[in-house]
Amino acid sequence: MLILNEETCRRLLGIDAAAAAVEEVFAAMARGEATNFPVVREDLGHAGALFGFKSGFDKAGLTLGVKVGGYWPDNEKRNLTNHQSTVCLFDPDSGQLIALVAGNYLTALRTAAASAVSIRYLAREDAEVLGMIGAGFQSPFQLRAAVRQRRFKKLVAWNPHPEMLSRLAEAAAEIDLPFEAVELDALGAAADVIITITSSFAPLLKKADVKPGTHIACMGTDTRGKQEVAAELLAAAAVFTDEVSQAVAIGESQHAIQQGLISEDWLVPLGAVINADHAGRSDAAQITLFDGTGVALQDLAVAGAVVRRACSEGAGVTVET
Ligand code: NAD
């Protein structure tokens, strides 16, 4: 059995390899060759923590496993990340545990990979201005992944807590991307691609804020009740997602569905576009929206990728099972 810690994962896996792994598993999901199993998420009644499992099996990539972890709100006071997770991978032929992989960095990476894959397949080729709503821990990962997909010339950003925008400004400076903090309407008027990555429970971006031809990757809404964009925006857009059932239940789509503005068949799995079973964007004026809710198979895909890399480089610690 192989054990990979956070530092080894950071050293071995970058965004391009993560995006390739996520793209592949989205495609397998859309072909019905990879399945996410029901998610378990429980309030521990201890340390204010939420704890759960996300598992799945990718028959095409032969990746079987579970991500175990959750959220411990007081960790920050102890200099630990509030979100904690570990991925266990199993041999699909025998059920034997083959790897224990630290999941914190990989979770950030696989989330950034999902919005990057959506930009690759759905954004206009001539997109030049990237807009970001959100400036938390996850935001620099989304930024670094997005700039690999199009030749962006500028980043415009807004955050409900403006003091946090320095994090994005620094990340943009590191990659030589001009940065401007703007109001939301100015962000929508300027941006060709918008990524939302906040913990919002009320719509931030309105339909009128967004110009024709924009691609929006909604990445923050992963729980019942959260919302980043107006429900009317989904009804005006071509909507794509990682997994339709999860998007309807806990994604950005939940609100437009509940309000009767769209039905479940409005949503298209991004994997169908990757497989060329769906055309994706229909024309340059269409608004496309990716509802990225975060599925187990993304975690397993990047964990599988880092384990393969570790095996080829002899990295990590091996122990007898
Ligand atoms: P973080 O706590 O570091 O940052 C939170 C962000 O949300 C900041 O931009 C903050 O200003 C904003 N925010 C906080 N409270 C808010 C409120 N009440 N209304 C509006 N905005 C608010 O979190 P993070 O790690 O950057 O993650 C951001 C979001 O992305 C979280 O909601 C997280 O659950 C979600 N997430 C989704 C996936 C996925 O796969 N879809 C994966 C990881 C994280």
Image (tube, rainbow, N blue to C red):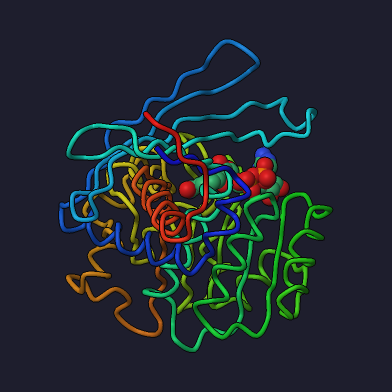
Return the residue nearer the eye: 132 or 233.
132
Residue 42 seen in the current view: yes
Report the residue at 47% width, 62% height from top.
Answer: 115
Report the residue at 46% width, 40% height from top.
Answer: 318
Return the residue nearer the eye: 32 or 247.
32
Q: Is residue 143 above or below residue 295?
A: below
Report the residue at 44% width, 59% height from top.
Answer: 309
Where residue 186 sits in the image (x, y, percent)? 69, 72
Residue 202 seen in the current view: no
Where residue 204 sits in the image (x, y, percent)? 61, 53
Q: Is residue 270 left or right of residue 157?
A: left
Report the residue at 28% width, 56% height from top.
Answer: 267
Where residue 183 sits in the image (x, y, percent)? 73, 65
Q: Is residue 136 left or right of residue 296?
A: right
* Residue placed furthest toward the bottom: 126
Return the residue nearer the eye: 46 or 156.
46
Where residue 37 sits in the image (x, y, percent)? 27, 35
Q: Quadrant of the N terminus?
A: top left
Res 255 quadrant in image = top left
Q: Is residue 301 above or below residue 171?
A: above
